[in-house]
Amino acid sequence: MSFVLWSVFIWGSISMYCLSYFYYTLDEGSTRPGADNIRDTSLNQTILIWVLPIQITGLMFLSTIGTVLYHRVNPKIILIICTLIMVACLTAVSYSSNWWQFLFLYGFGFPMSLGPSYFIPVMCAWEWFPEYKSTVTGCILYGLGFGPFIFGFISTAITNPNDVKPDVEGIYFPIEVANRFPHMIRICMACWTTILVIAICLIRRNPDFEGQG
């Protein structure tokens, strides 16, 4: 499950594809960059740097709530709710046609949907392996770095399989590359949802600790 949690931080791999996507209109067959094809003239590379700090804030803001809910609500229920909210946010993200809508949904909504589940796998592992807390924590946190690493390659392979270089002002990718951005979001969402469903099926608290606050 931790494999998914920090996959929100693939932003470094997909940010320029996102910029290119919002640069162009989605008119079928439209390939000419220019005033008629710009979605938001205020969108540039500088504004992209705000996405990652917003994601970290959103994820950490709700992570502590999960530790409180853990002792009151079945972890499976927490994960199911988080997964449903994540799917809703990413589906909306993939259909966003406005940068600020995208920023709210992908910057705040997506990571905040996963925030409550952040510490759940660690706390479950501690109950099952109380004498090896540091070991199991290390194994779980390994997934936090491995997830973005793997999905960084996956997202690039989907959006830009031919390794096309930016050809508009040296910044924006061709429209055929940019228009794969929503599809990439949906494919990653399907992968993350599958992983979370498996986690929901497998995770459970140690009966010896249930009922303890």
Image (cartoon, rainbow, N blue to C red):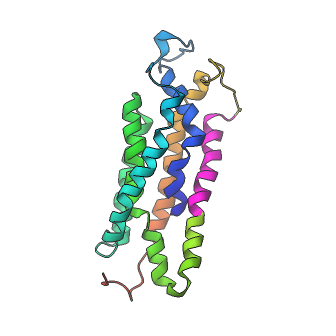
- Residue at figure coordinates x 65%, y 24% from the top left: 166
**In-image side of 24 versus 164 (left or right):** left
- Residue at figure coordinates x 53%, y 52% from the top left: 7
Residue 95: give x, y in percent of width and height. Answer: 41, 33
Q: Is residue 124 above or below residue 162?
A: below
Residue placed most toward the observer, 59 or 128: 59
The residue range painted magenta reads 143-161
Give the position of the C terminus as an image quadrant.
bottom left
Check residue 48 for magenta coloring: no
Q: Is residue 47 above or below residue 146?
A: above
Q: Is residue 211 above or below residue 25?
A: below
**In-image side of 90 versus 32 (left or right):** left
Q: Quadrant of residue 201?
A: bottom left
Residue 156: give x, y in percent of width and height. Answer: 63, 40
Check residue 154 for magenta coloring: yes
* Residue 34 showing in the rendered view: yes
- Residue at figure coordinates x 52%, y 37% from the top left: 183
* Residue 83 showing in the rendered view: no
Residue 146: give x, y in percent of width and height. Answer: 62, 58
Numbered label tally: 0
> Secondary structure of the magenta portion, mostly?
helix
- Residue at figure coordinates x 44%, y 75% from the top left: 123
Q: Quadrant of residue 3?
A: bottom right
Q: Quadrant of residue 175?
A: top right
